[in-house]
Amino acid sequence: MPQESQKPEKVYYFGTCLMDSIYPEAGLAGLKLIQREGVQVIFPREQSCCGQPAYNSGFPKEAQKVALKQIRLFAENYPIVVPSGSCAGMMKHHYPLLFEGDKNLQRVQQFSERVVELSEFLVQSLDIQLADRGQPIKVTWHSSCHALREMHIIEYSKALIRQLQNVELVELQNEHECCGFGGTFAIKQPKISGTMVADKVSDIRQTGAERLLAGDCGCLMNISGAMDYQNVSIRTQHLAEFIWERTHAK
Amino acid sequence: MPNDTGPNFQQNASRALDDQQLRKNFKFAMGNFILKRKQIFSDESETEQLRQIGNTIKQRALSQLPQLLERLEQNCSRNGIRVHWAETTAEANQQVLRIMNANEANRLVKGKSMVSEEMGLNEFLQERKIEVVETDLGEFIIQLNDEKPSHIIVPAIHKNKQQIADIFHQKLPDTPYTEDVEELNAIARRTLRQKFYRAQVGLSGVNFAVAETGTLCLVENEGNGRMSTTVPPIHIAVMGLEKVVERLADIPPMLRLLTGSATGQLITTYVNMITSPRKPGEKDGPKEVHLIILDNGRSAILSDPQLRQTLQCIRCGTCLNHCPVYTRIGGHAYGFVYPGPIGKILNPQIEGLKKAGELATASSLCEACAEVCPVKIPIPQLLRRLRNESYTSEHLATVKDGGCKKNLMETIAWKGWEIINTHPQINAIGNKIMSRLGARLPRIGPLKQWTRYRTAPKLAPKSLHQLVDEEGIRHE
């Protein structure tokens, strides 16, 4: 794991398209967590999407255009904090592949090197210390595939949860298994995807947890939609929002 | 040949998902395989090093494949193994038939071979009145029941003990019903022993062929492979041309990767290194050994530097075991010889995108396969490439039937997506409209599929962009 020796003065924040339209409170919570540590956060106004939907669906040209838009917006040499393992994985590991042989490659690489997922940033760069103000609660955690296998940051997310004194973390039996989201996969293979998420819901239920936490809004949207459909009343929440709620002075 | 559009994957998958017994059998079996692999590859950094070595060996072989195949042929010939080249599966079948006919043979025993499945060899020979007997226990079971393998290395994994007991009882004469595993094994052994004695030809696959020495390497756990390759007077080995490695020294790490990934074993019970037929004065072994090297579209795959990585595969099956899709639908639902993640990249390239392209959509790109692949094939990346090939312009495509899925609807949809995400004003307006419409959005197209298993996502009244503005966050 790369260890940054120093807290940066300023960072960029990439809010992701799903947070923008569906989970804005989670997006804002992540941003405030960074601010609270005394780091200035820049939110380029024209940012939109990392481009992954098109990239994964067989439309790399369209993905390139959207990616380039972001790359231009995050031009200064600040770390780019991303509150999603999947979008971070796209920007850090897939952008250089997407632009292989392209004239912009070098610029893209310089961008990708600066991308860091939120949990890792909070733990590694900020050494954040959390004082839990919340009521005792039992939660479980879902690892997104790309946070786990591309960004390798799950231990940071869990370390943050473990810092919260009144929070009991019960792990899933099949934590490492995909929830079935996969972007357009959920649309193109609805029954397979639906079965995967139904299995994930069963796994969550058997933990007896009151809340499911995750670091990726795609998974959250999928799992919460399936729980809602099945009338399961376990709340789902992005880790950043959960931490912010429990640690900020009201 | 199946029809032009290929099997109906969604229908097959749907049926499999509704089959609770099947799902239980797979979940149990795959869980075990995952556990066993984990135990044998417990040291993460050592495993990573080993996988890197495996990757290097296969890439080194593929980068000089024509030369290596020539060397393999020369060295095999020098050792007395006769080499035959087959561009198509039809040619390969004819070569097997020719060897059988030349020896007036009408009884064949087989060790496990996926390439022979690719060839449709059993059907081909049976139509010509040749008895073909599968001797791998799993293959034996499904042959009795007239089924195809559902897994690359454990072909009858979709059956549980009771189902196997039933098949033996019904299909083998004078066999009482028993669920006793030892007894079931003994029944298979008794039946097969006779077949080994009477067969004139034994056929096997090849795990690795060593160019340097002209050696065919074959791993197995039941001894049936050794019986098939040594008891009948003639041995025919069939292999895809990607199975060649350069040196004998490449074998130990490859074996370690193969058996560890496949069954969680340090080494299999039998490792056969076949370098020649029986020599004068030797007491056993076949009089003739033939090697049929099959192309069947592999050369075309080799010519593309990215897709070439598909040919690194050593058919360990671990990507199947770890795949959340395969684990739920099993092998038959794929409708092709090679199921699971490797099948999703291999079949579309061999059979064309029209027939097999849908397989590439049957992945959430979770990367569980890439994480465990012993030769580090970037399967998710190749799936993206194949998805792209399906939509690309025909003249730019390199895979068969490239561009076959190109359609106006999706082209417009993704262009629209691009415009929205590169024009912030349009994006903001779109967001506003969507959040106002909210629950009133019509359940058609993507949303219809989504809401079959979930409620529709609820758009927030204010976007993050708006919240950030209200908070006075700097934009620079």
Image (spheres, helix red, strand yellow):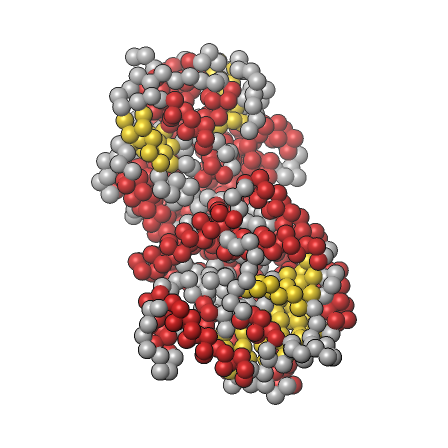
Please identify the quarter of the rendering in which residue B301 is found.
bottom right
Question: Residue A183, percent across and down?
Answer: 42, 42
Image location (x, y in percent) of residue A127: 48, 18
Q: Nearer the viewer, residue A227 or B303?
A: A227
- Image side of residue A228 versus residue B430, left or right: left
Which residue sits at x=45%, y=67%?
B138
- Position of A92 with respect to B24 (left or right) is right
Residue at position x 36%, y 73% in the image = B167
Q: Is residue B258 left or right of residue A101?
A: left
Q: Is residue B310 visible?
A: no
Q: Is residue B406 above or below residue A84?
A: below
Q: Is residue B333 or residue B228 the one in the foreground?
A: B228
Relative to residue B44, is residue B331 drawn left or right? left
| Position in image of residue B252 (x %, y %) | 64, 54
Instruction: Name which residue lies at 55% across and 62% down.
Output: B269
* Residue B266 seen: yes
Looking at the image, how many numbered discs can be counted on the residues? Answer: 0
Residue B118 location, x and y as percent?
54, 68
At horizontal 45% and vertical 78% (from top left) the residue drawn is B190
Looking at the image, residue B180 lies above or below residue A193 = below
**A95 and B208: which is toward the camera:** B208
Dividing the picture into quadrants, the one containing residue B228 is bottom right
Q: Residue furthest bottom?
A: B104
